[in-house]
Amino acid sequence: MTTTQRPPTLDPLAVARWQRVATAASPWLHEEVASRMQDRLQWIKLQPQSWAHWGAVRGGLKAHAQLALKYPKSVCFVAEAQEKHRLNAIEKIAKPWWSPALWGRQPTRFELPPPASLDMLWANMALHEAADPLALLAAWHRALKINGFLMFSCLGPDTAIELRAVYQQLGWPPAGHELTDMHDWGDMLVQTGFAEPVMDMERITLTYDSPERLLQELAELGRNFHPARFAGLRGRHWRARLLEALSTRLLRGADGRLSLTFEVIYGHALKPPPKIRVSASSSVSVEDMRRMLHGTGHVQN
């Protein structure tokens, strides 16, 4: 995928609708990926004094509780784009002012973080649903302080590859929008001003005892955002055909359970000091000068 403003096979109207109707709950897979992403924090030396959980309700409420325990004296922002998710986050995360759980801790702030206010931004399983990923990455970059870091995860191209093959065999439109490769995410991180991106991926195979349970879990995880997806509603006959196709065409393990692959991409990157080009006549903005006074600026010839 080229680093354009918007993935070519993602319908932004479908994304906006899903973000409005998505269940205010953390899917099991999101919590599992968040747990694996937390393991990677052992390699991060910086202890954030302020951090944000971007999309905590869908990204993982259990993971949020664990991160709050890890950074008990840090200022924490919970950033939710949808009001219903913000209210749900307050209900699930906020503690009464008199609660012993707040003793010695900073109260959580349920709002978007101000520019240049964060040492860490944590975003689990959100980026693959962004209608304008470069804009989202740029927003994360603005929220970080100099030398602050981004930790994120998202789904990769091999996700549900078995389901995509079944749709293709049946001559149906694509089962989902094309997901971005980790190398392209690395390029976009650099394009939006991040430095030292580190990307890796793994494949997780989930198994199901029935095609109905498989479809239920997929519905909890997201929707088909492909512009060429089936238009309108489909009836019971179509669903029966889909269930039959999944039951007979998907791979089954020795235990007879259906299997489905999820490719998970993990990313980490820093916000570097601004680079100032030096010429015969140079100008430096007040904002860049302030940043350089609070960090180490790089001068580029």
Image (tube, rainbow, N blue to C red):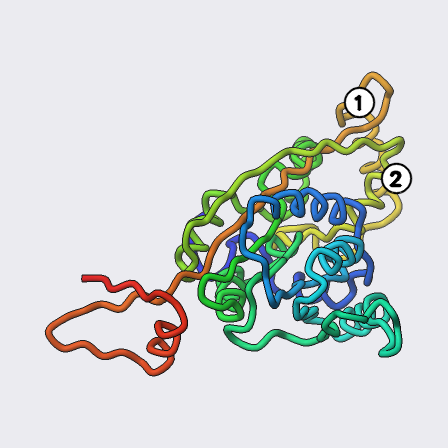
Does the image show residue 79? no
63 over 283 or under it: above or below: above
Circle 1 crowding by C-alpha within 10 Å: few under 14, some 14–19, many from 20: some
Circle 2 crowding by C-alpha within 10 Å: few under 14, some 14–19, many from 20: some
Does the image show residue 202? yes
Residue toward you, 73 or 259: 73
Residue at 87% across, 70% down: 100
Question: In this view, which residue lies farthest toward the top?
Answer: 254
Whether residue 218 sits left or right of residue 81 in the image: it is right
Which tag, 2 or 1, sits closer to the chain's start? 2
Residue toward you, 104 or 207: 104
114 over 250 or under it: above or below: below
Q: Secondary structure at mark 2?
A: helix
Badge 1 amino acid: Arg
296 over 30 or under it: above or below: below
Can you tell which quarter of the image residue 242 is in? top right
Q: Position of residue 128 (x, y in %)?
A: 61, 52
Badge 2 amino acid: Glu
Question: Mark 2 to mark 1: distance in Å?
Answer: 15 Å
Q: Which mark is residue 252?
A: 1
135 over 36 or under it: above or below: below
The residue wearing badge 2 is: 212
Q: Position of residue 235 (x, y in %)?
A: 85, 49
Q: Position of residue 35 (x, y in %)?
A: 72, 45
Can you tell which quarter of the image residue 74 is in? bottom right
Q: Position of residue 64 (x, y in %)?
A: 75, 58
Residue at 52% across, 50% down: 268
Whether residue 12 sits left or right of residue 190 in the image: it is right
Question: In this view, which residue lies farthest toward the left?
Answer: 280
Q: Secondary structure at mark 1?
A: loop
Whether residue 143 sits left or right of residue 78 in the image: it is left
Question: In this view, which residue lies farthest toward the front?
Answer: 104
